[in-house]
Image: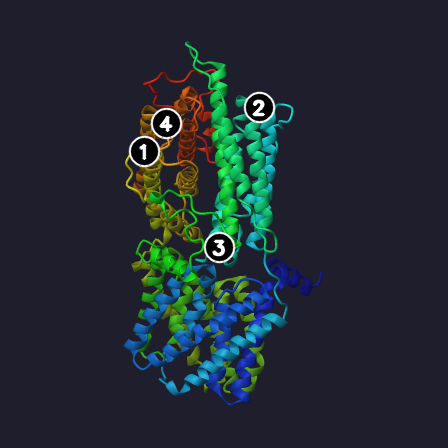
Amino acid sequence: MSRTRVLVDRLLARDPGLKTVHRAVRVSLAACAGFYSCRYGLGQPVAGTYALFGAISVGVLSRIGGGSRARVRTLLLVLPATWVLVSLGTLLAVRTWAAALGMLAVGFAVAFATVGGPRLVGLANGLQLFYILPCFPPYAPDDLPQRLAGVTLGIVLLAAAELLLWPAPPPVDYRDRLARAAAAVAALADRTAARCEGPTARRPAADPDPSAEPMAELRLSRIPLLERPASAGATDRALTQAATALRHTRTQLLRIGRFTDRAGPDPEAATLLHATAEAVRESAAGVRPGRPAPAVPPIEAAVAAFEEQRAAAVHPFTAPDGRDPVQDRAAARLALGSIALEAAEGARFLALAVRISRRAPVPPDRTPPAERPGPFWYAGRPAARLWWNRFRYNLTPRSVYFQNALRTAAALAAARTVAGSLDLAHGFWVLLATLTLMRTTAADTRMTLRPALTGTLCGAAATAVMLVLVGDRHLFYAVVLPVAMLVAFTVGPLLGLAWAQGTFTVVVAMVFAQLAPAGWRLAETRLLDVATGAAVGTLAGLCAWPRGGGRELRRRTAELLADSAAAIRETVAVLTGAPASGGALRQARVTAVLTEATYAQYRSEHHDTPPDGPDWQAAQLAGLHTVRGAEQLLARIAPESLAPWPDTSGSLARDADRAAAAFRGQGAALLAGRPADPADPLLAEARTVLTDERTTATLLPADPAALHAVDLAVWLGGVIDDLAALAAPAADAVPSGAAVSPPGRPPAPPGRRPAVPPDGTGPPRSPW
């Protein structure tokens, strides 16, 4: 095999589809075309410089997602912002202090704007450069028209290259992922319904779950950053909630499979599950544009019919001695029915979220007035209001977006002050190094220093040799610059930071050698500026939140568990008629959103995770399950429904207190840095109590309101099972259905509840 073939194979292995090479070609051609046409064709070196750096800023330093048409739209939409930033940088360059204050304000505003979604995250670094480049001497406000014209030319040329040179196909849309996952969950619902119909239709429990892999494709770790539905708009919010509702539905379907053997045939539950499957299937089809949005009334009618049939059933009573098999079967059927209702409610939430994402009309909010705004509060709200809410919730030192923005702004302002005070010849390199090398943790920033400085040193050495040997021969630099750009913009992303810094040093030297006489000291200046910028970025990382998202994630997760505890108590209080302060569920919902943002940053950082460290995802899922289940209960059950049964209401209130205490205990352990205790007595007692509640619920009269006590007990048992995943090792996990009293073991006598689960096993891991 020839050496060329080997190199091509290695390139294809590192860059499948040659996407990086194609991008490098587009940026290099756009930058060089703008630079040469202005510098040599029109005799406007200022415009040429800004055309070149304009294309590089949005083509290399920025990340723009979507297909070619979507990228072109983004480039054209970003033009007004670039004009504003270039104008501000030009006008504030008159004094160092003015430029530094402007850098502080612009740096914070641009970095904090990333709270609006991943597309703004991708543009942030590039937009910062549009202020950085003109805010250095010479102070030349008369050159502003040339600068604006050059920036516009560079971005327009890059947009044209995106359309004409290897136009990128649209990536896999999140809607398609959601549709495939929903179709798989619908198939799981049909299979679960078949198991509920009777032994002849029941399939082996060992059948593979058809929804496992499609649901895994909805995990954010498998979705490119720029394609995630994480913006502040109603559509992305609805798609995110649709995925959450779909996960909740799937979790309940998996729990049902653990009750079917004990419950026996349950045609009513099977009918409800078939309706659930149909609702999920309609949502899978309706999430794509051009298809009818899913209808909500059919699943609501199925839920109402099931509740009527369940209320009409005759409840058996306890035999005088020990466990009655009939009662045990009735308890399992009650639990199965409650979980089926949760699955159906999840399908209803899914349909509503999909309708909102399609901008279709939605039914009125059924959330009790005391608990509003409900889960779909954003439906029909103006986009500006939604964006303002996103910014307002994150305008706090506890937000990782706020922390990152303040860290970035302070570092850039300090770098601008240092560069202006020392009168560095090319001070913008200082800010560029600070911007590109600083990370969200001090450890990550330190990790970038060695390759960055090594690459810059090698590039500076190569630049010095080139400048000494070539001198001021502009023709050489003009001919070689496109090739140097193509190599730099290709090997940098493929081979790492050292190559990126080294090759970019050579490219910048070639550009400035065509603008003014340059000697070998230009390489020395570049190395000094990069080292200065790296030092400023490192100090900023050491002084401002040096641990990044790690410490904040611990606080946020503990806060989420504490807020979930309050939401549990509030939900039970509302349904039993007890006094409730209100607002706990709403606060838990907000905390869950902020915790997810913190966890996303944490996953992007380097951490040494101890083997007995917290299961952050399990903690988040416990909080999300609590919020989602509470929303569904409050939407389906009228407030004070259980008030006519004070004994049952009091028992459920005590159970809610135990569950809330378990949540607070786990949160306190996380906050204190203690490992979760598998033998936590609070967890054990809560699970045992809920086991008894499910069994004694068979003694209640046949009344819809009384059956809601079963729904509450099942929901509490589910959230406790999810919470227990924080402490239980996988080997000790047992099915969630084991929370109902195991066969062959009598329930705890009334008034006497053991401190450990009756079967001696640990709690299960969440199926999520």
Identify the mark nearer the N-term, 4 or 3.
3
Q: Secondary structure at mark 2?
A: loop
**In this view, 406 is above or below 679:** below
Farthest bottom residue in view: 43
The quarter of the displayed image where residue 483 is located: bottom right
Identify the mark nearer the N-term, 3 or 1.
3
| Front position among marks 4 and 3 | 3
| Front position among marks 2 and 4 | 2
Give whichever of 98, 455 is nearer the camera.
Answer: 98
| Front position among marks 3 and 1 | 1
Give whichever of 271, 663 is nearer the camera.
Answer: 271
| Front position among marks 2 and 3 | 2
The residue that disc 1 covers is: 577
Identify the mark nearer the N-term, 2 or 3.
3
Q: Is residue 344 left or right of residue 387?
A: right
Q: Position of residue 541 (x, y in %)?
A: 34, 60
Q: Residue at x 49, y 88 (%)?
A: 44
Q: Is residue 644 left or right of residue 234?
A: left
**In this view, 156 is above or below 441:** below
Give whichever of 482, 688 is nearer the camera.
Answer: 688
Residue type at numbered disc 4: Ala
Q: CA distance from mark 1 to mark 4?
A: 27 Å
Farthest right residue in view: 1
Q: Position of residue 614 (x, y in %)?
A: 39, 41
The quarter of the displayed image where residue 629 is located: top left
Residue type at numbered disc 3: Asp
Dot 4 crowding, Cα within 10 Å, few <14, some 14–19, many 20+? many
| Residue 236 image label | 3
The residue that disc 2 covers is: 265
